[in-house]
Image (tube, grey):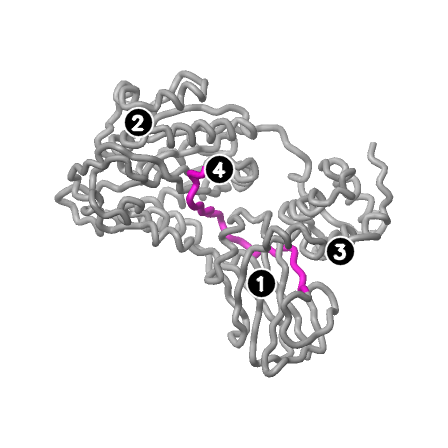
């Protein structure tokens, strides 16, 4: 049984557990995101070692709130849960994937994915998919990864010529529920055909994907994490006019989708389902249903200020003064518990400000800053600057947007892929593919605000 003096925890260091507990209890509910933020902070400091387990931390929180006579609802997910869901893996075995499977890159990444998935799921079930789902009897993930060959693809049958991507996504979603998360692996290259208007085809597929996701959202709590990976490719590529192009030892992107509840996606991300250590991961994007904007842990910091002010508390400064007409201050923010991921919040274009007289910049904290006492438990630094200082309630909003890399990696004409190196690292129709997903999650939402930070400024 842990014996940790309640008052000692706030006695030293810049991170005060009790102050944070008081702050997050202001609305009478400690959300899972808030709890995860607290836990992430204490795990970074050895003096909180006695509270590293959920049972100990929850007991401490209950005791603290009881002493302070604060009525608060704690998150159900704060205590470790049993593995209550399977993960069904669907590997698209169309002709377009043949060029990847003769190389080691994709096989090793898929094997690593399956190993990581075993850590948080009840059972991993293996399947191929083209125009139908083809179950793989073996549950040996090593054998499955090694048997990703043209011969085995052909032997499993199905219509391998072309795949209707929207239909594939709908079929996988149809098999996804609270007890069954899904992984879909494919190059996701659309195949309009020689006599089909490519743009019209992509637009129809985008609507069909949107429709499939909306239908599933009506049945369950759904989130989707999408990972872009790279792999060696030698084989035949089919361009948007269905012409065969021979590619030899080029690097091509492919994608891994994880589909499930928000909790399942969170577990997948926390367990690094797609490992960054193998060097094949390029980018990722996460889509979920937006509701009321979340409020991350944040505080105004002294570093990098221009002008002067007094600290009233973490979200309030007073006696603000300019220096040579300029005023600037920084906010440390913890985005570690948001499904979008740290890279997403490093893009200044996702932010909006209630006062357009301010400019904004944002960056991840450096390694040295992350290990410093003043920034312990935070991930980013947001800088606000203005030449028109006034008393204000400044609201900083982070919006749900399609990541910039999607358009940069998308193509509408892959006919020159045989010789164009820049085209070889793009995916035909990618912006329509993920555009359909993005639109589905925003259906009926007027404001796609996912984060809100408020700072009171008094002159």
Residue of label 1:
382
Residue 1 magenta? no
Q: Rounded to the nearest whole Å, what is the CA distance between mark 4 and mark 1?
A: 32 Å
Instruction: Tell me what residue is drawn at x 23 percent, y 48 percent.
Output: 420
Give the mark nearer the N terminus: 4 vs 2: 2
Residue of label 4:
260
Q: Which mark is residue 14?
A: 3
User: In the visual, does 199 lie left or right of 55?
Assistant: left
286 shown above or below 351:
above
SS under mark 3 = loop
Q: Quadrant location of residue 155?
A: top left
358 shown above or below 289:
below
Q: Rounded to the nearest whole Å, what is the CA distance between mark 1 and mark 3?
A: 19 Å
Give the mark nearer the N terminus: 3 vs 4: 3
* Crowdedness near tag 4: few (<14), some (14–19) or many (≥20) residues, C-alpha within 10 Å: many
**Residue extent of the magenta highlight:** 279-301
SS under mark 4 = strand
């Amino acid at each position: 049984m842990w014996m940790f003096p309640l008052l000692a925890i706030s006695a030293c260091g810049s991170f005060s557990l009790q102050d944070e507990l008081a702050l997050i209890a202001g609305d009478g509910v400690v959300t899972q995101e808030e709890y995860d933020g607290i836990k992430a902070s204490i795990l970074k400091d050895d003096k909180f070692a006695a509270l590293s387990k959920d049972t100990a931390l929850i007991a401490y929180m209950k005791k603290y709130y009881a002493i302070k006579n604060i009525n608060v609802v704690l998150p159900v997910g704060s205590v470790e849960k049993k593995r209550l869901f399977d993960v069904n893996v669907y590997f698209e075995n169309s002709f377009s994937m043949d060029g990847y499977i003769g190389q080691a890159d994709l096989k090793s990444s898929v094997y690593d994915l399956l190993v990581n998935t075993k850590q948080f799921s009840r059972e991993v079930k293996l399947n191929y998919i083209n125009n139908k789902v083809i179950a793989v009897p073996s549950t040996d993930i090593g054998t499955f990864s090694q048997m990703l060959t043209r011969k085995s693809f052909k032997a499993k049958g199905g219509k391998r010529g072309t795949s209707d991507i929207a239909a594939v996504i709908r079929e996988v979603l149809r098999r996804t529920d609270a007890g069954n998360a899904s992984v879909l692996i494919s190059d996701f290259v659309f195949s309009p055909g020689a006599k089909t208007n490519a743009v019209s085809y992509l637009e129809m597929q985008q609507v069909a994907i949107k429709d499939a996701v909306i239908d599933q959202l009506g049945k369950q709590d759904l989130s989707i994490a999408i990972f872009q990976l790279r792999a060696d490719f030698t084989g035949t590529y089919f361009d948007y006019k269905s012409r065969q192009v021979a590619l030899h030892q080029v690097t091509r992107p492919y994608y891994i989708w994880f589909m499930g509840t928000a909790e399942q996606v969170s577990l997948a991300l926390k367990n690094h389902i797609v490992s960054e250590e193998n060097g094949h991961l390029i980018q990722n994007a996460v889509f979920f249903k937006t509701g009321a904007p979340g409020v991350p842990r944040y505080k105004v910091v002294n570093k990098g200020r221009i002008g002067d002010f007094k600290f009233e508390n973490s979200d309030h400064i007073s006696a603000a003064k300019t220096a040579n007409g300029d005023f600037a201050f920084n906010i440390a923010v913890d985005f570690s518990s948001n499904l979008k991921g740290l890279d997403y919040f490093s893009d200044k274009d996702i932010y909006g400000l209630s006062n357009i007289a301010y400019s904004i910049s944002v960056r991840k904290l450096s390694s040295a800053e992350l290990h410093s006492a003043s920034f312990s438990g935070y991930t980013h630094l947001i800088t606000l600057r203005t030449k028109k200082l006034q008393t204000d309630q400044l609201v900083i909003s982070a919006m749900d947007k399609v990541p910039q890399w999607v358009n940069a990696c998308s193509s509408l004409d892959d006919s020159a892929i045989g010789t164009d190196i820049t085209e070889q690292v793009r995916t035909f129709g990618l912006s329509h593919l993920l555009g359909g997903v993005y639109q589905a999650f925003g259906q009926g939402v007027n404001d796609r605000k996912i984060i809100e930070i408020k700072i009171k400024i008094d002159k």
